[in-house]
Every structure is written in structure tokens, then in C-alpha cells.
């Protein structure tokens, strides 16, 4: 019982002597709501399966793309989550960082090394010779002579084994701060993994909707080409009737060929988006294609959360915050270098003239000792290291605050885009409807011979451009909706970051709470 109390007391003493400042997340002033979150484009009450996020919200909202209710997109996103190579790379980096934490945590324990030696020595006749042999903890001394006093030659075999233990107690918390730093780096990599995944998911959704917008444009171009062919035939009929000129036919033919050329260029852009999607889901472009399917869905209402809750949802902000803690722990590592190091060593040796003797009746010896070392002069190296660590921490604080500012910009940009695009969509649809009516009126007037064919061309161009603009606005709305979901953190939460123990479970203490600061 006394031994247990002794080790417990020593453990608590060592745990309490942790130099360097404990980490406290810097405060950031946040507005009560987003500036651009107004109007009917956004919902204060989210759709089924969602709720207004709270810090460390445990509700799974990871499959955010299902808000768009597109089965093809759902399948592509699922494939991306398993096959995207950037995500795989980030995952392996995270696993590597966890192994580095385990590597640093191993320094809490003593090291134990074993050695086994076999030493064979022949002692022959000759002039008087003194000899000294030492191996494996066994020492032999003697003299050989020649002549009348010559001894017979002899061969001696010595077996020896050593067991050496070495331990440097973490008196000043250097190991603890190192583990804390590595653990924060691992959590940063986990947040980076989430950010990489969210970025890839968002890019896929945006490429997908841009491709579908091109499909809608292609459908419009096909309908336009059909309309232009009818107009060309009408012009030929008018020419045959003597009410149109040859120039009218040429103009109609030019209009038709221009539309056909635009359709070809549309195919180039569509192919490039298709290739980009293939790479995102880990496929060769040659092995992937998407059938043409015009954009049919409208952007869903996006649940907007309050900034204080949103801060818990951005993996890039969480990554910056973890890097800040990592830099803070490095200050403690640098400060610990000022203090002396204690190294405890113990060795047990066994030796014998045979392997049997080594096992059953060895000559046993032991030694134990300690070494206390302190750097007396280093030319200001440690002082510079502490200054560098503190500057590194302040740099990470600035990076953290900048990440928050940039994130706010992302949210506000997409909020205003969605809100104004909704207004633009209403106006553009009205313009497209008016231009279609105007085109029909001009065609009727041309048939009656009251207007030249140039008026038809002008009306055709206006009808096509306004309708294309209306379709383009829908595509922009979809990509802006994806951008807003990304800016809001998708379905991620800081709750998803796995906690990492600083101390191994084998130790009789667990400082999950901040250690006492003895120097800073």
C-alpha cells in the first residue's frame, strides 16, 4: 500500500510540474445574425432532418446534398466519399498524425533493452604474457609462460546477458506538451480531412449543376435550331412568293448556322465538366459519362444558423483553432529546455562459462545510477526558441481570426447571391416570356409583309438571349446554394473531432483538464 501511495504521489507531482501556458481559445466577437440572411430565400426553420445547429450538435447532417433531391447526384457523392484520392490522402495523413501522437506518448515510459553476448577466447603457450579479458560483465586476468613453466593452451567461452532500463521522468512537462502539440496537430488533420471532404463534395455538386445547366442550354439551343429552320423555310417560301429578298434567306441561313455552332461549343464545355466529375469520383474520364438531363430542380430553402453556432460547423476554422493549440503547446516545449533533465539508468547482468550455467547458475551483477544534466550556456539558443514559439503562436492566432473573417465573407457572399438571384430569376423569367410573345408577333407581321426579316432576326436573338439568361440564373442559384451549404460547414460539427488522451491509460493519472502552470 505504501509503495502504491509513493508512486501515486510521484505521478501527481510530475503531472503538476508542467511549464508553459495552458491553452485558452481566444475570444472572437460575433454578430447576432448574418447581414444578408433576410427575405424568403432562407428558412429560420430547417427542413425535415435538419435543425438549427448548436455547438457540438450530435445530429448527423452529413449528407447535405440530399436537400436537392437528385438521385444521380446522390450516387455520385456516395462514390466520391469512397474513391476521391484527395480524401484518401487526407485520411492517411490523419492516420499518420495519430501514430505520431502514440510515438510521442511512448516517452512517458522507460525504455528496456536486452543484450545477449557469446565471447570465445583461446589462451596459448609462449613467452610469459599477461592477459586481461572483459566481456559481458565477466573479467578474466592471468599470465602465460613458456619453457619449463609453460602452461597448456586453453579455450574459454563466456556467455553473458544484459538487461538495461533507462527512464527520463517528465518532470517539467516537456513530453506532455509535445504530446499535446502532436494531439492538436492530429485533430487539425482530422478537421483538414473534413474540410477536404466538404470541398470535394461541394465541387462535385457545383460541377454537376453547371453541367445540368449546360444540358438546359443545349435543350434551348436544340429548340432554337428547330425554330430557326422553320424561319429559314418561311423565308424561302416568302422569297418564292416574291415578298422576300435573297438577303433575307442569307440572314436566316446565317442565324441557323450560328446557333448550330453554339451547340458544338456547348458540347465542349459539357465534356470538360464531365471529365472534372470523373476525376473527383476517382475514375478515368474515358470510363465515365453522364446522359443529358436538363436541370429540373429548383434551389431548396437553406437553413441559416446563428453565427455562434455556425462557428462550430466549419472544419477549416476548427483546423485553424487546433493549429493554434499546437503552437501554444510548443511554447511549453521550448520553456522546458531551460530546466535540467534527470536520467535514471539500471542494468542487470548475468554471465557463465556455458549456456546451461548462464541459465541455472549465472554470475549475476547489477548497477544503478542517475544523471542530472543542465545546459549552462547556449548563446541564447533557448531564449530564441521560446521567442520563436511565442511568435508562432501569435501567428496562428492571426490565422485563426483571419479564417473566421474569410468564412464570414463566404457566407455573406453566398447569402446575398441567393437572395438577389431569386429576384433576378423572377425578373428574367418575365423578360423571357415577353420576348417569346414579341417574337411571335414579329413573325406574324413578317408573314403579312409589314416588317422586314431583320426585325425577325432581332426578335429571335432577344428571345434566345432572355430565355438563356433565365436558365443561367437557375444554374447560378444552384451553385450558390451549394456554396452557401459549404460556407455553413455542410453537415460537419466540432463534435466530430475525436478527443485524444494526453497521458497513456497505463499511467495512474489522467490530466484531461489543463495542467497547473509553473512557468510561462
Image (cartoon, rainbow, N blue to C red):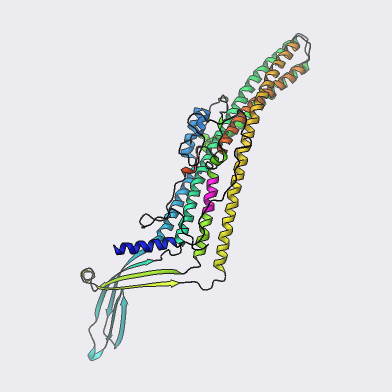
Residue 336 x, y percent position in the rendering:
49, 64
- The residue at 67%/17% (across/down) is 227
Residue 136 x, y percent position in the rendering:
31, 73
Part of the protein shown in magenta: 317-325
Q: Is residue 128 above or below residue 270?
A: below
Quarter-wise, where is residue 429 in the image? top right
Examine the structure image and report whether residue 319 is included in the region drawn in magenta.
yes
Evaluate whether residue 126 shows in this view.
Answer: yes
Q: Is residue 248 above or below residue 13?
A: above
Q: Nearer the viewer, residue 442 or 239?
A: 442
Count of numbered circles in the view: 0
Q: Is residue 64 above or below residue 231?
A: below
Q: Nearer the viewer, residue 285 or 106?
A: 106
Residue 445 x, y percent position in the rendering:
75, 11
- The residue at 59%/58% (across/down) is 391
- The residue at 50%/43% (across/down) is 194
Q: Is residue 351 left or right of residue 373?
A: left
Quarter-wise, where is residue 130 in the image? bottom left
**Predominant secondary structure in magenta?**
helix
Q: Nearer the viewer, residue 196 or 417?
A: 417
Examine the structure image and report whether residue 187 is included in the region drawn in magenta.
no
Q: Nearer the viewer, residue 508 or 329?
A: 508
Residue 190 x, y percent position in the rendering:
48, 46
Evaluate whether residue 228 shows in this view.
Answer: no
Amino acid at each position: 500500500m505504501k509503495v502504491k501511495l509513493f508512486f501515486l504521489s510521484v505521478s501527481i507531482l510530475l503531472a503538476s510540474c508542467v511549464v508553459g501556458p495552458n491553452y485558452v481559445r481566444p475570444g472572437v466577437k460575433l454578430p447576432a445574425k448574418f447581414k444578408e440572411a433576410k427575405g424568403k430565400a432562407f428558412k429560420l426553420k430547417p427542413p425535415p432532418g435538419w435543425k438549427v445547429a448548436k455547438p457540438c450538435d450530435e445530429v448527423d447532417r452529413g449528407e447535405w446534398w440530399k436537400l436537392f433531391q437528385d438521385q444521380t447526384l446522390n450516387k455520385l457523392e456516395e462514390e466520391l466519399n469512397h474513391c476521391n484520392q484527395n480524401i484518401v490522402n487526407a485520411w492517411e495523413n490523419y492516420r499518420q498524425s495519430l501514430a505520431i501522437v502514440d510515438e510521442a506518448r511512448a516517452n512517458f515510459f522507460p525504455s528496456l533493452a536486452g543484450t545477449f553476448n557469446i565471447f570465445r577466447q583461446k589462451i596459448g603457450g609462449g613467452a610469459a604474457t599477461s592477459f586481461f579479458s572483459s566481456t559481458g560483465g565477466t573479467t578474466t586476468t592471468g599470465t602465460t609462460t613458456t619453457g619449463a613453466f609453460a602452461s597448456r593452451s586453453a579455450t574459454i567461452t563466456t556467455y553473458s546477458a544484459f538487461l538495461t532500463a533507462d527512464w527520463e521522468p517528465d518532470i517539467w512537462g516537456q513530453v506532455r506538451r509535445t504530446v499535446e502539440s502532436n494531439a492538436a496537430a492530429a485533430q487539425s488533420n482530422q478537421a483538414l480531412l473534413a474540410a477536404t471532404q466538404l470541398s470535394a463534395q461541394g465541387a462535385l455538386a457545383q460541377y454537376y449543376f453547371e453541367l445540368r445547366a449546360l444540358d438546359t442550354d443545349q435543350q434551348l439551343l436544340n429548340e432554337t435550331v428547330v425554330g430557326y429552320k422553320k424561319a429559314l423555310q418561311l423565308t424561302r417560301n416568302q422569297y418564292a412568293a416574291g415578298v422576300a429578298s435573297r438577303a433575307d434567306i442569307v440572314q436566316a441561313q446565317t442565324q441557323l448556322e450560328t446557333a448550330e455552332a453554339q451547340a458544338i461549343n456547348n458540347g465542349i464545355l459539357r465534356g470538360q465538366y464531365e471529365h472534372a466529375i470523373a476525376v473527383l469520383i476517382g475514375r478515368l474520364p474515358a470510363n465515365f459519362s453522364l446522359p443529358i438531363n436538363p436541370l429540373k430542380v429548383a434551389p431548396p430553402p437553406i437553413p441559416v444558423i446563428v453565427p455562434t453556432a455556425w462557428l462550430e460547423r466549419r472544419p477549416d476554422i476548427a483546423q485553424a483553432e487546433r493549429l493554434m493549440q499546437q503552437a501554444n503547446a510548443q511554447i511549453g516545449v521550448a520553456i522546458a529546455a531551460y530546466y535540467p533533465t534527470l536520467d535514471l539508468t539500471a542494468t542487470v547482468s548475468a554471465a557463465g562459462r556455458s549456456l546451461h550455467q548462464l541459465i541455472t547458475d549465472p554470475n549475476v551483477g547489477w548497477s544503478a545510477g542517475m544523471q542530472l544534466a543542465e545546459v549552462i550556456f547556449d548563446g541564447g539558443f533557448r531564449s530564441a526558441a521560446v521567442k520563436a514559439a511565442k511568435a508562432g503562436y501569435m501567428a496562428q492566432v492571426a490565422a485563426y481570426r483571419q479564417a473566421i473573417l474569410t468564412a464570414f465573407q463566404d457566407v455573406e457572399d453566398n447569402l446575398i447571391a441567393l437572395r438577389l438571384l431569386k429576384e433576378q430569376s423572377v425578373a428574367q423569367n418575365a423578360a423571357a416570356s415577353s420576348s417569346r410573345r414579341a417574337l411571335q408577333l414579329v413573325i406574324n407581321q413578317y408573314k403579312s409583309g409589314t416588317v422586314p426579316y431583320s426585325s425577325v432576326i432581332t426578335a429571335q436573338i432577344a428571345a434566345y438571349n432572355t430565355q438563356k439568361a433565365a436558365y443561367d440564373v437557375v444554374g447560378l442559384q444552384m451553385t450558390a446554394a451549394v456554396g452557401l451549404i459549404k460556407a455553413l460547414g455542410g453537415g460537419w460539427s466540432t463534435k466530430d473531432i475525436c478527443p485524444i488522451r494526453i497521458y497513456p491509460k497505463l499511467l495512474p493519472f489522467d490530466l484531461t483538464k489543463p495542467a497547473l502552470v509553473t512557468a510561462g
